[in-house]
Amino acid sequence: MIKRLPLGLVPATASLFLLVGASPVSAQLATIAATPTTSAAVVAAPSMSTPIAATSVAAPALPTAVNAAQGRAAILSATPRPASGLTPPTGAQDVRPAVTHASLWPLMYARMNGAALSEQEECIAIAVYHEARGEPFDGQLAVAEVIMNRAASGLYPASWCEVVKQPWQFSFVNPRSGKMPAVNRSSASWSYAQAITRIAVSKAADALPSDVLWYHADYVAPSWGRRLAMVEKIGAHLFYRAFARS
């Protein structure tokens, strides 16, 4: 079971996490069942070390809806683009299929028995397992990418393990000791979490923009969410970026 902190104990300045995309599913993939294991989603709160100042963001109103046409489609980086003899209209954009639970299955299957994860990669996999093992594959990939985005952002610790173990960020981690609970290493959920991590680290699939650093479960409404711009809802998680500076 995931140890969740009561909402009232999550600092108002702590951080969240996210993911995107939808595409047609082939008949061959349509019969694939969703991830069998269910777990509760938890909130990753904004970092106490990087509070979001009210003066640093524009337009405080949170969007009430996400226009998919304005978002960035998640892509499979190895997907070939079909040749076309047609001249595209002016302003046309080259778009690849969006990542979905079903479209990720071939990548998942290929990477379930890959090389052993490094210590840093295992921190991501453990976070995916505890935070998102009840989520569809694209939602799990989004959580992995938020961790990687944070480490690359300059606003959070520079290593993946330090990001995961940062106090008050992930409720499954003991904020005082940084200790993480055990995982069931014989479970399908752990195999999926490892495969998701290999996909994220190798960038075989691109699920989120690099500036998405926060997310929370859809059944809570933390006050800090109003200071961020929602990018996408994937499964039970809402993903955010900071508002653009004026």
Image (tube, rainbow, N blue to C red):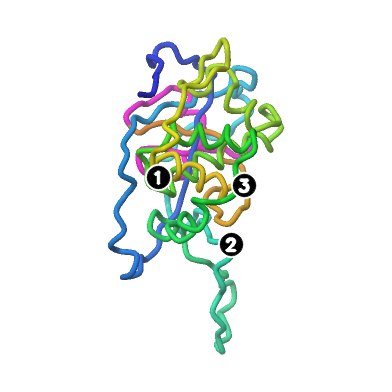
Q: Secondary structure at mark 1?
A: strand
Quadrant where the image shows the N terminus: top left
Residue closest to the far front: 186
Label at residue 184: none
Q: What is the crowding at mark 2: few (fewer than 14 residues within 10 Å), some, or many (at least 20)?
A: few
> What residue is at 37 percent from the left and 46 percent from the top?
136
Residue on which disc 1 sits: 234
Q: Report x, y in % for residue 18.
A: 48, 40
Q: Are marks 3 and 2 in contact (CB under 8 Å)?
A: no
Q: Which residue is mark 3?
A: 201
Pick the front one: 209 or 81: 81
Q: Position of residue 164 (x, y in %)?
A: 57, 27
Whether residue 242 is visible here, answered yes or no, is: no
Amino acid type at mark 2:
Ser
Q: Nearer the viewer, residue 109 or 207?
A: 109
Front-most of residues 66 and 106: 106
**The magenta stretch spans residue 162:** no
Residue at position x 51%, y 32% in the image:
126
Q: Tell me the quarter of the picture where residue 43 sits.
A: top left
First in sequence: mark 1 vs mark 2 = 2
Q: Magenta segment range?
A: 219-245
The reply to whether dot 3 and dot 1 touch (C-beta < 8 Å) is: no
Q: Residues within 10 Å of mark 1 (few under 14, many from 20)?
A: many
Q: Amino acid at mark 3?
A: Val
Q: Identify the residue at horizontal 35%, vertical 38% (top origin).
A: 134
The residue that mark 2 highlights is 77
Residue found farthest to the bottom: 85
Element type at mark 3: helix
Circle 2 SS class: loop
